[in-house]
């Protein structure tokens, strides 16, 4: 098959169009995420700050064990590539402490999945927002699109990946609970059906006047999330973003991140085209060389 300049640019254009269509399909899938999937209700009034969830998460995901020193509570912490969840502390009143764990919120319509041009991030039918490192091209659009600042990048690695809580997708597929919810000794973490957890959260709020803030964090934030929180302090005190819009992020970013700039989708197919064009030129060169050698042997 002969590939000329015109053929090369046809390959690049067609493949780039396919990449753009793929990104749009991913965004549509994210919007269609069901609200009745698995979820976790976090009651921060019950959390004792034992950080057993951190240790269980590290073990389940083959991460470095979390520090045992209680001084980690001296400052607000964020997740990083070796910590998919962290527990922070705040003071409700003198002598009264509150704790809460942070991790990926697993949005019903995740902005990270919508923004990813190669579908390395996706919302699985079972509920978790999962990451495929074999697809990732390292653009880090997912990090920009996340309203909760969750995805982290392995900047120090020779083969960097985006890292975040997996919602123990593999464990859930086997009928097991997420590791963190399984080890919580105080009942602060309840795993179940999101719709039922949301009802339970509202019941706790309205049957315990004065105990909770009248708000379920995660019910509407970013269009709704799989993780839901009830608390008696402001979520900002627990190092959570409180400026998250209620509309799904893919809706807000449809003009910017859900369909990446054309140059980002063009590079992979362009490189493929260059590779095919170069290979064809090399084949022609080798064929001409063999033909020339054959003629010399015939004359000899």
Image: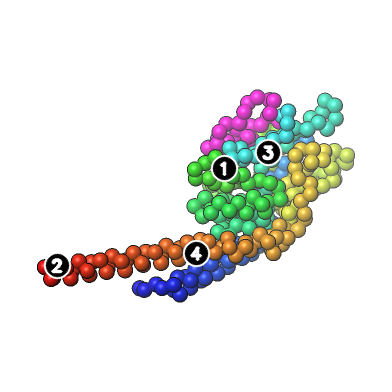
Dot 1 corresponds to which residue? 155
What is the CA distance from the residue labelled 4 to the residue labelled 3?
38 Å
Image marks 2 and 3: residues in contact by CB distance under 8 Å: no
In the drawing, does residue 14 fall left or right of residue 219?
left
The quadrant of the picture occupied by the N terminus is bottom left
Dot 2 corresponds to which residue? 297
Image marks 4 and 3: residues in contact by CB distance under 8 Å: no
Residue 149 in the image, given as x and y percentages of width and height: 68, 46
**Which one is earlier in the sequence, the residue at label 1 or at label 4?**
1
Residue 198 counted in the magenta span: no
Viewer-proximal residue, 23 or 218? 23
Image marks 1 and 2: residues in contact by CB distance under 8 Å: no
In front: label 4 or label 3: 4
Q: What span is colored magenta in the figure?
A: 49-72
- Name the residue located 67 percent from the left edge and 54 percent from the top edge: 145
**Which one is earlier in the sequence, the residue at label 2 or at label 4?**
4
**For residue 65, above or below residue 168:** above
**Which one is earlier in the sequence, the residue at label 2 or at label 3?**
3
What is the CA distance from the residue labelled 2 to the residue labelled 3?
72 Å
Q: Secondary structure at mark 1?
A: loop
- Name the residue located 66 percent from the left edge and 36 percent from the top edge: 86
Residue 200 in the image, given as x and y percentages of width and height: 76, 47
Q: Secondary structure at mark 3?
A: loop
The extreme left residue here reads 300
Residue 296 in the image, given as x and y percentages of width and height: 16, 68
């Amino acid at each position: 098959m002969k590939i000329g300049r015109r053929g090369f640019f046809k390959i690049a254009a067609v493949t780039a169009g396919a990449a753009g269509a793929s990104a749009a399909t991913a965004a549509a899938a994210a919007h269609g995420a069901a609200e009745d999937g698995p979820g976790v209700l976090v009651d921060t009034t019950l959390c004792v700050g034992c950080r057993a969830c951190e240790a269980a998460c590290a073990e389940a995901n083959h991460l470095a064990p979390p520090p045992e020193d209680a001084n980690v509570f001296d400052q607000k912490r964020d997740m990083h590539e070796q910590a998919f969840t962290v527990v922070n502390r705040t003071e409700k009143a003198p002598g009264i402490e509150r704790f809460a764990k942070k991790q990926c919120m697993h949005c019903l319509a995740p902005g990270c999945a919508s923004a990813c041009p190669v579908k390395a991030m996706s919302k699985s039918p079972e509920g978790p927002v999962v990451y495929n490192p074999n697809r990732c091209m390292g653009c880090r659009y997912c990090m920009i699109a996340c309203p909760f600042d969750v995805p982290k990048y392995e900047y120090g690695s020779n083969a960097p990946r985006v890292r975040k809580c997996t919602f123990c997708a593999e464990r859930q597929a086997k009928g097991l609970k997420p590791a963190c919810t399984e080890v919580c000794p105080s009942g602060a973490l309840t795993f179940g059906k999101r719709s039922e957890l949301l009802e339970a959260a509202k019941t706790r709020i309205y049957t315990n006047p004065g105990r909770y803030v009248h708000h379920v964090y995660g019910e509407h934030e970013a269009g709704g999330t799989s993780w839901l929180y009830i608390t008696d302090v402001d979520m900002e005190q627990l190092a959570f973003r409180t400026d998250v819009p209620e509309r799904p992020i893919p809706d807000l970013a449809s003009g910017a991140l859900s369909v990446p700039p054309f140059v980002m989708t063009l590079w992979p197919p362009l490189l493929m085209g260059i590779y095919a064009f170069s290979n064809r030129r090399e084949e022609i060169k080798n064929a001409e060389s063999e033909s020339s050698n054959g003629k010399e042997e015939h004359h000899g």
